[in-house]
C-alpha cells in the first residue's frame, strides 16, 4: 500500500496535530499523548508545525472537535501551509470527509498513522501481510460507511444506481477479495511458524521474550545479550518482526530470547489482532523481560500500556522480570528531582526490578543472574506420587507437564515429569522429591 505520508523531495510534509481533552482524561494525558503523536508523525517523515487542543464533553458527531474550533485551526493551517492534519483519536470516515472540506487538506487519525509507519517498517512476508490486512480492515468499514453516505445523497437528487454505486460495490468486493487472499496466505505462513516453534520446543530450551514500550531499548538489549545485530534506533517502531537468538547464561543454561514489536498506548485493536501471530512468541514464552525506559517522563504510563496489551493477548500472568533500562540517562538525579522521583516510585512498586543500561552494559550481569534464577526451576523435574482416585490431578499433570516416565502399579501412580515452574504449587502435595535434570 502507498505510504499515507509522503516524503517529497522538495520538503517534508507539514503536519498539524489535534488532540481532544475529554472530562474522563487528564489535560496532562492529552498533552503527553499529543507529544507522542508528534514523535509518530516525525517517525513517518512529517514535520510538525503546530498543534491544537480542545476541551470536549463528547466528540462532535460531524467534526469530532467543535466546528468553530475546526475552522479556527483550519485558518492557522492555511497560513502555515500545512499538508496534513492528524487527530490523536480515531475518526469515523464521515468525520474525515467533513474535516477534509473544512481544512482543505489531508486528514489522518492516530490509527492510520501507526498503520502507515508499520507498513513502512515491515520486512518479512508475514509482517507485510499482517500490516496489509490491518490496513484493509481499517479501510473496509470506511468504504461501507462512505457508500451509505453516497447512496443517501444519490437518493436525494434522484440518481439511484449509476456509476458511483457499481464502482463502490466493485471496490468493496476487491478489498474483501484481497482480505480473503491475505488471510489464506497468512494461515500458511503461520503453520510454517508453528512447525518451527514445535521444533524449538523439542529442544527443551526455555523461551524468554523481550517486551516493552516502543523505543524502550528492547533491541539494544537483545544485541547486548546475544551479540545479535537487530536495528536499534531512536525512532518509534524500529522493530516489527521478531528475532530470536540463543542466549547462553553464565550457568551454561541455554535460553531462546526473542525481541519483538514494541507497544504503544491507544494501539489500534485491529493491529493487536493482526499481530497475534508475531506476538505468539510472547504468549508461548516461559519468561518475559519487560523493558522500561526509566529516563522517560511517562515511564509509569508506558508500563501500564504494555500491561494492558499483554493482558489483551493473554500473557498478563506470565512470570516477568521488570528491566529498568537507560539508567545511564538518569544523570544520578535520584533525589526526587528529574526522573529520579519516578525511579524511586517504580522501584517501590517493583522491588524485584533489575536496573540496567543496555547501552553501557551496566547491570547486565545482574540481569543474567536473575534470568537464570527465574528459569532454573524449569530445569528441575519432579517425582510425583498421585493416588489413583485423583484422576483430575493425573489429567492435569498430563495437560501441563511433560511426562518422562509413569507407573500405575502399586497403591498410587508414580510419575517423573517436567512441570513449568508456575504450576509447581498445584502439584506440591504430590511431590516425592525434587531432582536436578541433566543440563543442556
Ligand atoms: N542512553 C541510552 N540509550 C539507550 C539505551 N538502550 C537503548 N538506547 C537507545 O534508545 C533508542 C531505542 O532503542 P531500541 O533498542 O531501538 O528500542 P526498541 O525498544 O527496540 O524500540 P522499537 O523496536 O522501536 O520498539 C536507541 O537510540 C538506543 O540507542 C540505554 O541503556 N541508554
Ligand atoms: Mg526494536
Image: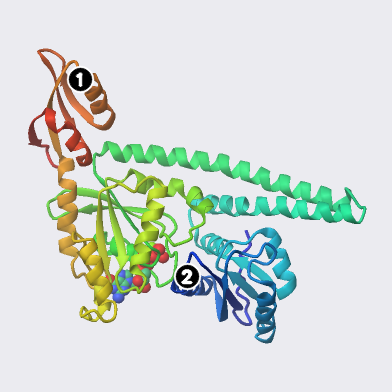
Q: Residue at x 21, y 78 (%)?
A: 334
Along the line of sight, the residue nearer the viewer: 101 or 261: 101
Is the CB of mark 2 within 8 Å of ligand 1? no
Asked where in the image residue 75 lies, by quadrant, the reply is: bottom right
The residue identified by callout 2 is 33
Name the secondary structure under disc 1.
loop
Is the CB of mark 1 within 8 Å of ligand 1? no
Q: Is residue 124 left or right of residue 156?
A: left
| Position of 172 relative to 100 (above/below) | above
Q: Residues within 10 Å of mark 2 (few under 14, many from 20)?
A: some
| Position of 283 relative to 61 (above/below) | above
Q: Estimate the x, y position of residue 56 in percent, counting from the top left.
A: 58, 69
| Position of 220 relative to 256 (above/below) | below
Q: Estimate the x, y position of residue 244 in percent, counting from the top left.
A: 33, 52
Asked where in the image residue 345 lies, by quadrant, the reply is: bottom left
Q: Estimate the x, y position of residue 315 in percent, counting from the top left.
A: 35, 47
Residue 231 is at least partly visible in this image:
no
Q: Residue at x 27, y 45 (%)?
A: 286
Name the secondary structure under disc 2.
helix
Q: Which mark is residue 390?
A: 1
Q: Quadrant of the N terminus?
A: bottom right
- Specify the farthest residue to the bottom: 79
Residue 96 is at least partly visible in this image:
yes
Q: Residue at x 16, y 52 (%)?
A: 372
Of callouts 1 and 2, the N-terminal one: 2
Q: Estimate the x, y position of residue 217 in percent, counting from the top left.
A: 33, 66
Along the line of sight, the residue nearer the viewer: 267 or 32: 32
Amino acid at each position: 500500500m502507498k505510504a499515507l505520508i509522503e516524503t517529497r523531495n522538495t520538503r517534508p510534509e507539514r503536519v498539524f496535530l489535534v488532540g481532544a481533552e475529554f472530562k474522563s482524561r487528564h489535560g496532562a494525558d492529552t498533552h503527553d499523548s499529543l507529544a507522542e503523536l508528534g514523535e509518530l508523525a516525525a517517525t513517518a517523515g512529517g514535520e510538525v508545525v503546530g498543534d491544537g487542543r480542545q476541551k470536549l464533553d463528547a466528540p462532535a458527531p460531524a467534526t469530532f472537535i467543535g466546528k468553530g474550533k475546526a475552522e479556527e485551526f483550519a485558518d492557522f493551517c492555511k497560513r502555515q501551509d500545512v499538508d496534513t492534519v492528524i487527530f490523536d483519536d480515531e475518526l469515523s470516515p464521515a468525520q474525515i470527509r467533513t474535516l477534509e472540506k473544512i481544512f482543505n487538506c489531508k486528514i489522518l487519525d492516530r490509527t492510520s498513522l501507526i498503520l502507515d509507519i508499520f507498513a513502512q517498517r515491515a520486512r518479512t512476508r508475514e509482517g507485510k501481510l499482517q500490516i496489509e490486512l490491518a490496513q484493509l480492515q481499517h479501510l473496509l468499514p470506511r468504504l461501507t460507511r462512505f457508500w451509505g453516505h453516497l447512496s443517501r445523497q444519490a437518493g436525494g437528487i434522484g440518481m439511484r444506481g449509476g456509476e458511483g454505486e457499481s464502482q463502490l460495490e466493485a471496490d468493496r468486493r476487491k478489498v474483501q477479495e484481497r482480505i480473503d487472499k491475505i488471510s489464506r496466505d497468512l494461515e500458511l505462513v503461520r503453520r510454517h511458524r508453528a512447525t518451527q516453534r514445535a521444533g524449538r520446543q523439542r529442544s527443551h530450551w526455555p523461551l524468554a521474550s523481550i517486551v516493552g514500550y516502543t523505543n524502550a531499548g528492547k533491541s539494544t538489549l537483545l544485541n547486548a545479550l546475544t551479540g545479535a545485530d537487530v536495528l536499534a534506533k531512536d525512532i518509534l517502531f524500529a522493530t516489527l518482526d521478531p528475532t530470536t537468538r540463543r542466549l547462553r547464561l553464565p550457568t551454561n543454561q541455554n535460553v531462546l530470547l526473542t525481541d519483538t514489536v514494541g507497544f504503544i498506548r491507544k494501539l489500534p485493536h485491529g493491529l493487536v489482532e493482526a499481530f497475534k501471530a508475531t506476538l505468539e512468541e510472547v504468549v508461548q514464552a516461559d519468561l518475559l523481560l519487560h523493558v522500561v525506559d526509566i529516563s522517560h517522563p511517562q515511564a509509569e504510563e508506558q508500563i501500564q500500556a504494555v500491561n494492558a496489551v499483554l493482558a489483551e493477548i493473554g500473557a498478563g500472568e506470565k512470570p516477568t522480570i521488570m528491566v529498568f533500562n537507560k539508567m545511564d540517562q538518569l544523570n544520578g538525579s535520584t533525589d526526587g528531582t528529574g526522573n529520579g522521583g519516578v525511579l524511586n516510585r517504580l522501584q517501590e512498586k517493583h522491588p524485584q526490578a533489575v536496573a540496567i543500561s543496555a547501552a553501557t552494559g551496566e547491570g547486565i550481569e545482574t540481569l543474567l543472574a536473575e534470568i537464570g534464577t527465574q528459569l532454573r526451576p524449569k530445569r528441575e523435574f519432579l517425582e510425583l506420587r498421585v493416588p489413583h482416585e485423583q484422576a483430575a490431578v493425573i489429567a492435569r499433570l498430563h495437560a501441563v507437564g511433560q511426562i518422562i516416565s509413569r507407573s500405575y502399579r502399586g497403591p498410587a501412580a508414580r510419575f517423573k515429569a517436567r512441570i513449568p515452574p508456575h504450576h509447581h504449587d498445584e502439584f506440591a502435595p504430590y511431590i516425592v522429591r525434587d531432582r536436578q535434570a541433566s543440563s543442556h
